[in-house]
Image (cartoon, rainbow, N blue to C red):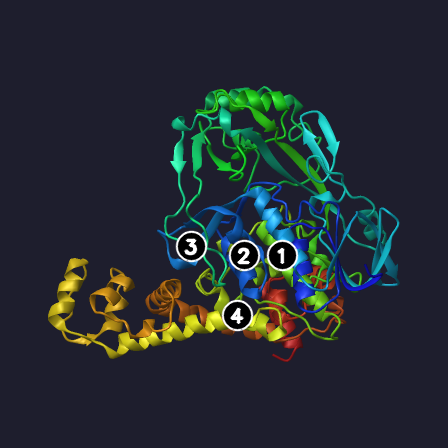
Amino acid sequence: MEKEYDVIVVGGGHAGCEAASAAANLGSRTLLITMDMTKFAQMSCNPAMGGIAKGQIVREIDALGGYSGVITDRSMIQFRMLNRSKGPAMWSPRAQCDRSLFTLEWRKVLESIDGLDFWQDKVTSLVMNGGKVEGVKTGMGVVFMGKSVILTAGTFINGLMHIGDVKLRGGRMGEAPSGGLSEQLAEHGFEVGRMKTGTPARIDGRSIDFSKMVEQPGDTEERKFSFLKYTTDYSNHKSCYISYTNPDVHAELEKGFKTSPLFNGTIDGIGPRYCPSIEDKIVTFAAKEQHQLFLEPEGHSTVEYYINGFSSSLPWEVQLKALRKVPGLEEVKIFRPGYAIEYDYYPPTQLKHTLETRGIQNLYFAGQINGTTGYEEAAAQGIIAGINAHMNRQQGNQFILGRDQAYIGVLIDDLINKGVDEPYRMFTSRAEYRILLRQDNADERLTPLSFGIGLASKERMDLMEIKVHGRERLIKDLEDKDAQLEDTNVFLTDRGTTPLKEKGKLLQVAKRPQVNLDDVIDHFNVVNWKEGLSEKQQSDVVESTEIGIKYEGYISREKRMADKIGRLEEIALSPKIDYDKFKSLSTEARQKLNKQRPETIGQATRISGVSPSDISVLLVYMGR
């Protein structure tokens, strides 16, 4: 152990693991402090990674050289590509994971990284010198000095759990909370708030009658999250199952409302509107007679199941009686009841885009303490904080992703410019440039940037270039090959699309929405482009090419729009501007601009309360 580090990471959750690995891989002497080294990146809620928009984030983390995608692939027990019936901007990978294996694989990775040390303890305070952080002090009284500190304590900061009338202090069931940090930060002028999240009961799979439920198997086509070259084992994947609540379930739940901390005022924190508890659902959607439940396996070596859609903080007896009214759960046994948890968070408008705090130099926040929810959102913040904490040693260098570059860029920009009034979760609807930010092209968007700063490996860069060159060769083959009328028209007619009137090129045939590019390649024997590519690489090239040629117009339009709006990001605003002097600005705009200190005109446009007319005033001031 050393007494001084370049980067100290506090917390071993998804944000902490990505932050520590990124900083260490970039060359910083890094220390990761966590209360339990057996629970790295613990899946505290459901045992899954990815989903709508979240899957895109995992692929972006992977493209940057992070590990969330790799670990997901190694621990995967089911994979599904969601939204395949929609356009490619909406395709979202999602995987069920073996919860225990996921944590174990993370530990293997972390312990393999040179320059990364560990200390099992809780951090009770920061070591401060004026407006800078210089280290941390732990519960054992040990002081570690660091040039940068990344705080990723998740739900552990003053965590309080609720099960009916029962209150338990902790950051996760069976684990102690962390105290002292919020009080210290508040003394230094930080705003501190409370948020709430929840989790369902865990149940015994041996007591489930799956015959009364709808089986939901994974995809049979082999897919994975990481762009790296390796295979995943699909031979022993497990299914999920679907069941539904009913009026009898709702009636049982309502019996416990008088002791529900959600309704009796015990809980102060703000909960996620899009992921409500089951008691919230039956009140908010009183007319609905049923709500869908997903039963998700926790792993290969356990009978434990997670009931997605049944989060609750009601007394455990009420939860059990209600569950036994669900078809297939008549004899169910629970391992652990659901509970709600309140915890401290720090409104993210107090951060820079690097995730360094505005109030304390060299201190970074990442994860749920910024008001987000979800493993993927936390991990994304972690890798960006880790990169920037490392780059902090090189004065003036920073790594920031734009809204047109990544969902990660949208996430961080939303947090800093808009703030949060509920736990933030990423949706595709939050991104203006969805067709640019697809899950299939995350490597092309981000790997060159990460390779340029020394994080993404040459292997990643080479694999990305192989795909791009393969796509270029395939497009050239399609452009060079004639579409003979007779044969081509038989092919087109069979697929229900209009025949050609004159001879053309195969590229024009492949652009038709009714035509599948794989069919074109097979039928017209387009094979030259395949040389040197593995079967998996060929599949990736075909998918990338088909999206590119069929959505070319949409992609070009979004690029033009992004370029136009991006010019506002180049107009810098001085951090010393006194917006109170601009009497033409609205009162709200002056207050918000003085508080949040946007670095560019583009950032100012995304602050709630700053109107287009306010932006015009700023542009006139800037001589634009």
Say left or right for 231 vs 3.
Answer: left
Q: How many marks?
A: 4
Q: What is the distance, in whole Å, between disc 1 and disc 2 at their CAs?
A: 10 Å
For image coordinates 81% across by 59% down, the residue present is 1
**Mark 1: secondary structure:** helix
Residue that badge 1 annotates? 109
- Residues at badges 1 and 4 in contact (C-beta under 8 Å)? no
Residue that badge 3 annotates? 223
- In the rendered image, residue 404, in percent from the top left (x then y), is placed at 52, 67
Specify the farthest residue to the left. Answer: 486
Q: Residues within 10 Å of mark 1 (few under 14, many from 20)?
A: some
Q: What is the distance, in whole Å, between disc 3 and disc 2 at their CAs?
A: 12 Å
Give the mark nearer the N terminus: 3 vs 4: 3
Residue that badge 4 annotates? 459
Give the mark nearer the N terminus: 1 vs 3: 1
**Mark 2: secondary structure:** helix
Give the mark nearer the N terminus: 1 vs 4: 1
Q: Quadrant of residue 175?
A: top right
Residue that badge 2 annotates? 70
Q: Residues within 10 Å of mark 2 (few under 14, many from 20)?
A: many
**Mark 4: secondary structure:** helix
Give the mark nearer the N terminus: 1 vs 2: 2
